[in-house]
Image: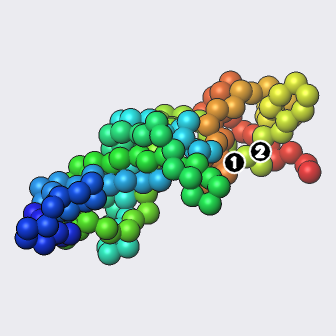
Amino acid sequence: LVSAVAMKVGEPAGVQHTVTIVNEGGFDLKAKVPEIDITKVKEGASVEVVFDAETNTAFVGVVTFVSPVSTDVSGVSYYDAYISLDQAPEWMREGLNADVMIVADKLTNALVLPARYIGTDAQGSWVLRQTEQGIEKVRIETGLVGTNDTVEVYNLSVGTTVLLPSQ
């Protein structure tokens, strides 16, 4: 589909763009990823997209390409991440704005605790565990930090009673 023609009949072609063609079949979305997050974005990562035109629906897609070349926006380097939607809406048009959430990491079958239950000191992270004998400090390893202030923990079993440390 030709969406714009920047020439007149008989005019010689130059180096500027003369015709804009839009693909009617499928669209790739382009998201700008700031340099601070670029190490977390990989090809094949899952994506959730919510368009300004339809804020009640999230569309699922995948990152198909991450540009190795940056673009400077107000002194910050951004990298283009191209996204293909699993199922594009029929109302999809070029130039639509959207909020994009790229899933950098995902927890499945993981034990998580609210961060406020985890203490740290020079030796690392710990929790207070309630036992029949009383309260004991147990060393733990931590993993991913969730978006709702939770932390993935190792070295604990499901069903362990942990106590909130005093502040």
Q: Could you say which is closer to the camera, residue 27 or residue 140? A: 27
Q: Could you say which is closer to the camera, residue 84 or residue 54? A: 84
Q: Callout 1: helix, strand or loop? A: strand
In the displayed structure, 24 sits above or below 38; it is below
- Across and down, in percent, residue 146 comes to 60, 46
What residue type is disc 1 on? Answer: Pro
- Picture quarter with the N terminus: bottom left
Q: Could you say which is closer to the camera, residue 166 or residue 37? A: 37
Q: Residue at x 72, y 39 (%)?
A: 161
Residue 104 visible: no
Q: Are marks 2 and 1 in contact (CB under 8 Å)?
A: yes
In the displayed structure, 121 sits above or below 51; it is above
Q: Residue at x 68, y 24 (%)?
A: 155
Alpha-carbon neighbours of circle 1 within 10 Å: few (<14), some, or many (≥20)?
Answer: some
Left or right relative to 165: residue 107: left
Residue 13 visible: yes
What residue type is disc 2 on? Answer: Tyr
Q: Residue at x 69, y 48 (%)?
A: 114
The mark found on residue 114 in the picture is 1
- Across and down, in percent, residue 108 comes to 47, 36
- Across and down, in percent, residue 21 comes to 16, 60
The mark found on residue 57 in the picture is none
Say how many tags the image has: 2
Q: Callout 2: helix, strand or loop? A: helix
Left or right relative to 71: residue 46: left
Q: Quadrant of residue 2?
A: bottom left
The mark found on residue 117 in the picture is 2
- Across and down, in percent, residue 22 comes to 17, 61
Q: Residue furthest left?
A: 9
